[in-house]
């Protein structure tokens, strides 16, 4: 069984954020930690340095606003920067991707790169808003959900993939097992 479509460069970055959350600290958790540190450290230091809670609070609020504006700017610039860097190397930013399920392995095929993950090394399969993500040891194989013409085609593919995974991997993959009805 296989599915195919076009993978856009950088598209898997969002899905990888979910992977970091499953294996450690997610980007959202990192942002929350930064904001808490700004408040917990910045506010008392601001009061100590300026002598006023109001002035310190205003400084912290402006710092948080600046941080948010900076994050938006980075997000807006990262896509065009990536496409420009790829073009400078003679690479396309859109690549045809085929993901194939064989009895022995999951095969992730791009034009010049083929990744083969034997089923015992596929440790997780989970769904994000726009992707299905296979974790194979320390590799992330991202399958855009738009590759499926219908919800039934998506369900059939995921059920087939889950059926080939180990019991332990299925236990770590509640999104996939919900689709199987198990």
Image: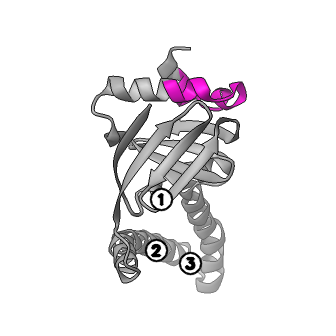
Residue occupied by mark 1: 13
Q: What is the x, y in percent for residue 155?
A: 41, 25
The mark closer to the camera, 3 or 2, is 2
- Image quarter where the N terminus lies is top left
Q: What is the x, y in percent for residue 115?
A: 56, 52
Mark linked to residue 58:
2
Q: Nearer the viewer, residue 140 or 74?
A: 140
For the residues labelled 1 and 3, the Cα–Cα distance comes to 42 Å
The mark closer to the camera, 1 or 2, is 1
Q: Main secondary structure of the magenta part?
A: helix
Residue occupied by mark 3: 52
Q: Which residues are magenta?
A: 160-177
For the residues labelled 3 and 2, the Cα–Cα distance comes to 10 Å
Residue appearing at x 60%, y 38% in the figure: 105
Q: Is residue 11 left or right of residue 172?
A: left
Decide which of tag 1 and tag 3 comes sooner along the chain.
1
Residue appearing at x 55%, y 58% in the figure: 27
Residue 82 drawn in magenta: no
Residue appearing at x 50%, y 59% in the figure: 113
Q: What is the x, y in percent for residue 127?
A: 48, 37
């Amino acid at each position: 069984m296989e599915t195919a479509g076009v993978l856009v460069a950088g598209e898997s970055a969002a899905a990888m954020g979910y992977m970091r959350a499953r294996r450690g600290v997610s980007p959202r958790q990192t942002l929350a930690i930064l904001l808490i540190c700004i408040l917990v450290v910045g506010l008392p230091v601001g009061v100590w340095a300026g002598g006023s809670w109001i002035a310190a609070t205003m400084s912290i609020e402006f710092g948080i606003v600046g941080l948010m504006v900076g994050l938006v700017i980075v997000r807006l610039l990262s896509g065009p920067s990536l496409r420009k860097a790829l073009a400078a190397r003679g690479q396309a930013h859109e690549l045809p991707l085929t993901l194939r399920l064989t009895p022995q392995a999951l095969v992730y095929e791009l034009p010049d790169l083929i990744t083969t993950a034997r089923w015992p090394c596929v440790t997780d399969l989970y769904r994000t808003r726009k992707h299905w993500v296979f974790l194979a040891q320390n590799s992330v194989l991202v399958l855009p959900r738009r590759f499926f013409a219908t919800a039934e085609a998506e369900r059939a593919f995921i059920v087939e993939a889950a059926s080939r995974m180990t019991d332990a991997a299925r236990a770590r993959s509640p999104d996939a097992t919900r689709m199987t009805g198990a």
